[in-house]
Image (spheres, rainbow, N blue to C red):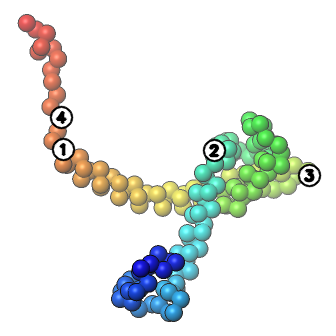
Amino acid sequence: MVDTSGRPSDSVEWKSASCNGLTDKNGPLSFNLMVEKSSTHLDGLFHALADPTRRAMIHALFSGQRSVSELAHPFAMSLAAASKHVKVLEQAGLIRRSIQGRTHVCALDPAPLAEGRAWLSAYERFWSERLDALDALFPPEIEIDDDADHRG
């Protein structure tokens, strides 16, 4: 039998063993607020990067500052829609927006990209090791000399 959390409801040992005793009547306790903060930050980063329009805006900012209207120009969208994309990028920490008169100017802040890359690099090592292990299971391919078949 499974309760609403997906855990077996009749298994007290499962609950205690999986949480090393850090449980109360509502389930496991969480003490690591840094992990939760970091996770939220990465969630915002990857959410911002998930949209192709926002990725194109970031790419445009690699060469320097741009106004919101300049960022919107390559796309068939209103200035309000572009501002919503800019706000998502800003909340993820990927851009800084300043106001110069009536113009909102955006600049890239690459620090969150470095944090995302650092997080992904752990998985790159994991998959590289797995692919190397898979490669070791297969014998090397034997190269066939095509010229030898045509010599007569």
What x and y, as percent, mark residue 86? 74, 52
Local secondary structure at mark 3: loop
Q: Amino acid at mark 2?
A: Pro
* C-beta proximity under 8 Å, tags 3 and 4: no
* C-beta proximity under 8 Å, tags 1 and 3: no
Estimate the spatial distance between the alpha carbons at disc 1 and disc 4, rounded to whole Å: 9 Å
Estimate the spatial distance between the alpha carbons at disc 3 and disc 4, rounded to whole Å: 66 Å
Q: Quadrant of residue 144?
A: top left
* C-beta proximity under 8 Å, tags 2 and 3: no
In the image, what residue occupies the spot 63% across and 62% down?
44
Name the N-terminal-most of marks 4 and 2: 2
Which one is closest to the eye, mark 1 or mark 3? 1
Q: Amino acid at mark 1?
A: Phe
In the image, what residue occupies the spot 16% across and 28% down?
143
Local secondary structure at mark 2: helix
Dot 4: few (<14), some (14–19), or many (≥20) neighbours within 10 Å?
few
Residue position for label 4: 141
Q: Amino acid at mark 3?
A: Gly
Q: Which mark is residue 52?
A: 2
Local secondary structure at mark 1: loop
Q: Nearer the viewer, residue 130 or 105?
A: 130
Residue position for label 1: 138
Residue position for label 3: 101
* For residue 23, above or below residue 60: below
Location of the C terminus (image quadrant): top left
Specify whether residue 86 is in view. Answer: yes
